[in-house]
Image (cartoon, grey):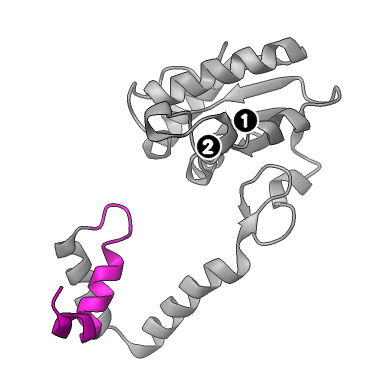
């Protein structure tokens, strides 16, 4: 970027947009131009919503999903089955499973999967926090719902070895989710079937 471009608000906006996942230079410029043409009230509301994400969103103290208070609504909900915990890699995976309407237990968000080549080990994930949740006898089953790829499978196997000695049933979602695919992109029927047909690890 030249010195002139650095001072250009359009170029600056496009450059910032390219830092978002899946946004290349052409898409970023197209989005920036659409914002230039957009209604001023919409642009102001969008800017406020973006700022609000950082001001208002945090992590649930129990499951580490995104929430606006200390504890998320699912962990507070007494109607849910507190004896089952579904372990997912990211908040978007929890959202995908929740959309099915088929699961009524609790969740635990790891915020990643094991990836030794990428420098992600157990200490970089919310594994210790999961173990703390399993102290006591209230949880009877942990469903590992990581994506069916190398990293997701490695994480599932690791968790199964870690959790089995605690006397908790550990299961894995069925392979209705395409091998090598990402959980967040699976359709609701596939996720529903994968949860229903889960198998012991």
51 versus 131 height, above or below: below
Residue 16 percent coordinates (x, y): 30, 69
Q: Nearer the viewer, residue 161 or 193?
A: 161
2 and 1 marks in contact (CB < 8 Å):
yes
Q: Any magenta on residue 171?
A: no
Residue 159 percent coordinates (x, y): 59, 20
129 versus 48 height, above or below: above
Please report the residue visible at 43 percent of the width from the left and 78 percent of the height from the top: 47
Residue 137 percent coordinates (x, y): 85, 22
Residue 91 percent coordinates (x, y): 53, 45
Secondary element under disc 2, as helix, strand or loop, is helix
Q: Specify the principal SS of the magenta part.
A: helix
User: Which badge, 2 or 1, comes first in the chain's sequence?
Assistant: 1
Q: Quadrant of residue 19?
A: bottom left
**Residue 151: in sight, yes or no?**
yes
Mark 2 neighbour class, 10 Å CA radius: few under 14, some 14 to 19, many 20 or more: many
Which residue is disc 2 drawn over? Answer: 97
Q: Which residues are magenta?
A: 1-23
Which residue is disc 1 drawn over? Answer: 86
Report the quarter where the N terminus lies.
Answer: bottom left
Please report the residue visible at 73 percent of the width from the left and 10 percent of the height from the top: 165
Mark 2–mark 1 Cα distance, whole angstroms, equals 9 Å
Answer with left or right where residue 162 lies relative to residue 92: right
Q: Quadrant of residue 25?
A: bottom left
Q: Any magenta on residue 14?
A: yes
């Amino acid at each position: 970027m030249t010195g002139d471009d650095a001072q250009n608000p359009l170029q600056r906006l496009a450059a910032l947009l390219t830092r978002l996942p899946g946004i290349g230079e052409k898409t970023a410029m197209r989005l920036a131009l659409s914002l230039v043409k957009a209604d001023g009230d919409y642009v102001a509301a969008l800017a406020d919503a973006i700022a609000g994400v950082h001001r208002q969103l945090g992590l649930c103290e129990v499951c580490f999903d995104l929430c606006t208070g200390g504890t998320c609504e699912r962990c507070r909900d007494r109607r849910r089955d507190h004896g089952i915990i579904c372990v997912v890699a990211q908040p978007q995976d929890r959202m995908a499973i929740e959309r099915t309407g088929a699961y009524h237990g609790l969740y635990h968000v790891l915020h990643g999967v094991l990836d030794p080549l990428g420098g992600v080990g157990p200490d970089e994930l919310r594994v210790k926090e999961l173990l703390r949740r399993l102290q006591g006898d209230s949880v009877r089953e942990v469903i590992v719902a990581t994506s069916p790829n190398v990293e997701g499978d490695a994480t599932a196997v690791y968790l199964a070895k870690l959790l089995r000695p605690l006397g908790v049933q550990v299961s894995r979602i069925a392979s209705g989710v395409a091998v090598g695919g990402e959980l967040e992109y699976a359709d609701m029927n596939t996720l529903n079937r994968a949860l229903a047909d889960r198998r012991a690890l």
